[in-house]
Image: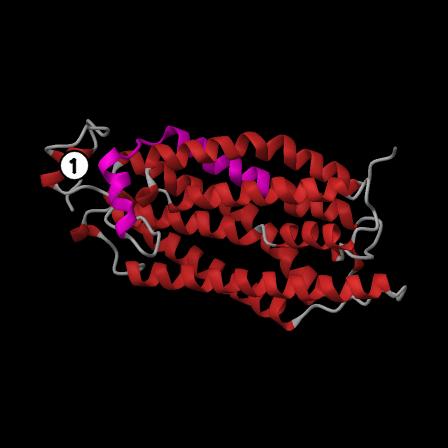
Amino acid sequence: MTLTIYNKISIIDLVFFLPALAIAGLLTYRHGFRRSSGWIYLVLLSLMRILGSSMQLATIKQPDNINIIIGAQTLQNIGLSPLILVILGLITRVQQAIPEQSRPRLPNSRTLRLIQLTVIVGLILIIVGGINMGNDIGNALSNGEAISYTVPSESKAGIALMIVGYVLIVVSAGFIALSISSVPSGEKRLIVAIFAAMPFVLVRLVYSSMATFNSSNDNFHQYSGSANAGYYVLGMCTVMEIASVLIFETVGLTLPYASRNDARQSTNSASGQPLNAFPTQEDSASEPHYFPKERESVQV
């Protein structure tokens, strides 16, 4: 049995994202949900890659099962948004770690929530567009017709929102970096992680943009694409996602983690963002001190 490039990509994803899922779950548990909106998106990305890869490998035994093919491709196409949302969550954590009197006016909590909403709406549109496109391709295959590579308008709108969200995140990270002297020492490594991951996420965004807006280039067509299309997926999607997750999880494992009280209070945040992540002085008197040196310098 000869494995295709997409089969090999799926095996790589399974080998990497199975342990990555465990680490992401550990980070979510360790930091508490209020401080870990970024980590929960790593859990979602890992689950999507594991499920999508499993479905893609299932096509080896069921190559004509259109539903499995559509499901695998749809999951492959929505890997960008969790990466952007991870960066957004980390930016929010750093922003809230800065003492209030030293915080930059932008980005503020409202701005960060607006960016989050933009990316989430984009994700929903991409899912809807992917399903519609998959159904069109499935109907063509069922009827023995040639596949017409037509990107739905929902997918185009979704990717456009992703581009807007990424640009706003870059700008927000720039403003936060200007206040790095006010960031607690234990949180400064997050700024390094954010800027280190941004180029990899950008390449992933470029792939999605090319696949959506440049329909004449067969190298970016996973359906009836060129012989090199799979290698573009490997280099511009799989490798970029793995590199980004490695950066996030490596830094996450070195961060001081939240107390149990922080984790319980996370349910009060409807947006899921780590707002007011750092305890007040009243809380610190009754909580275990997970930040023995840094917490004393943080004023909220």
The quarter of the picture where residue 223 lies is: bottom right
Is 271 on the left-hand or right-hand side of 141? left
Q: In this rendering, does residue 108 appear at all?
A: no
Image check: 124 left or right of 279? right
Q: Could you say where residue 235 lies in the image, as x and y percent from the top left?
A: 69, 43
Viewer-side residue, 67 vs 233: 67
Secondary structure of the magenta portion, mostly? Answer: helix
Q: Residue at the location (47% across, 46% down)? A: 41
**How dense is the environment of label 1, judged by Cα within 10 Å: few (below 14), some, or many (20 and up)?**
few
The one nearer the camera, 176 or 155, is 155
- In the picture, residue 175 is in which quadrant? bottom left
Q: How many marks?
A: 1
Residue 78, by quadrant, is bottom right
What's drawn in magenta, residue-wise? 241-268
Q: Position of residue 55 (x, y in %)?
A: 70, 44
Residue carrying label 1: 297
Q: Residue furthest right?
A: 144
Q: Is residue 170 above or below residue 114?
A: above
Image coords of residue 233 (percent x, y): 70, 47
